[in-house]
Image: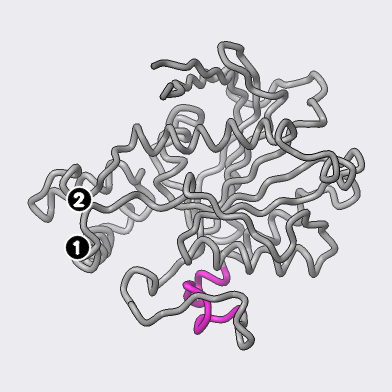
Amino acid sequence: MKTANYENQILSGESQVEKERNPQVPIIDIVRHGRTDYKELKDPNFNFDSKAEDFTLDTEHLDLNEDGIADAEGAARQLLATIDKDNEVVILVTSPNFRAHSTALVIEDVLVSNGVTLLNSGRTMETSQLRQINIANKEDLPEWIAADKKYREEDPMRFKGSPDKMHKAIATSLGKELKEVFTEDYGEINTRFEDYLRHMTNIYDYLNEKTKQQLAGKIIRIVTLTHEELPAKFMQATLGTEENLKNGQILELRPQDKIRKDTESEAEVVLYPKPEGESESSEVTVSRKFTLAS
């Protein structure tokens, strides 16, 4: 099986793209899930079922705490400020992990309530490409979650640190190598994130004629819910940041055209600040390219 290798080259400190975007190419928003108490990982009795008759968007039924619901609502309001409701339709795509899917449901509720057209309303798409990092032994999860919390609380700046570096330090605090804790490294995580971006950039190629007719010439905006580790290397390469994507923070990719093998394609990368609290913001233009290797 051939593996894709990705290159991202910064072209400028701020957006300089002037040519008209290909209307068949979507805008892709990457949103980190809201804050959580990790019921999926810690409570074997927790049942996340959005189709249940008594399901509501609250902390009892979602894998989000009150702050996490606020994160999701804040992200939704930011998206509302950028979505062109007359000329865009939204597709929601999420990690299968409960905290991400919970965030997607809150965002969907806000968007639909404010007149945004969702192409997959009530049918949020899940993909394993966006899943959390794979842990080697699930029985070690409670120890890892506790060590992660302890390490970051020792220095609040660590809550902002890039997860590849934070995870290595947390593993060291447990007397372990990172490869003993997780079954994939950050190079592999970055590849599946870049694979996702490539597939979504080229999504129009995979749509059936009925869906294309539903679009009626409108631009697709793909709102993506995932975890801090997924965009970490991409953010380092494109934005030069050593910080993570905060809970509910939005990283936006605006490709100019479809991305093809061995061909450079420009895109704007925008990191939006969170409405409340300290967080980075940045905007650059990058040249994207991928090659295939055996």
Q: Is residue 240 above or below residue 8?
A: below
Query: At label 2, which amino acid type do we have?
Result: Val
Q: How many marks?
A: 2
Q: Quadrant of the C terminus?
A: top left
Give the residue at x 17% y 50%: 171
Dot 1, how many residues are within 10 Å of its Cα: few (below 14), some (14-19), or many (20+)? few
Q: Is residue 6 above or below residue 140?
A: above
Query: At label 1, which amino acid type do we have?
Result: Asp
Q: Residue 265, image x and y in percent? A: 64, 18
Give the residue at x 60% y 82%: 52
Q: Secondary structure at mark 1?
A: helix
- Sooner in the amino-acid sequence: mark 1 or mark 2: 1
Residue 212 numbered tag: none
Dot 2 corresponds to which residue? 181
Residue at the top extreme of this rendering = 262
Q: Is residue 173 left or right of residue 292?
A: left
Q: Is residue 15 above or below residue 196?
A: above
Q: Are marks 1 and 2 in contact (CB under 8 Å)?
A: yes
Residue at the bottom extreme of this rendering = 54
The answer to whether residue 286 is magenta is: no
Quadrant in the rendering for residue 71: bottom right
Mark yes or no: residue 154 visible.
Answer: no
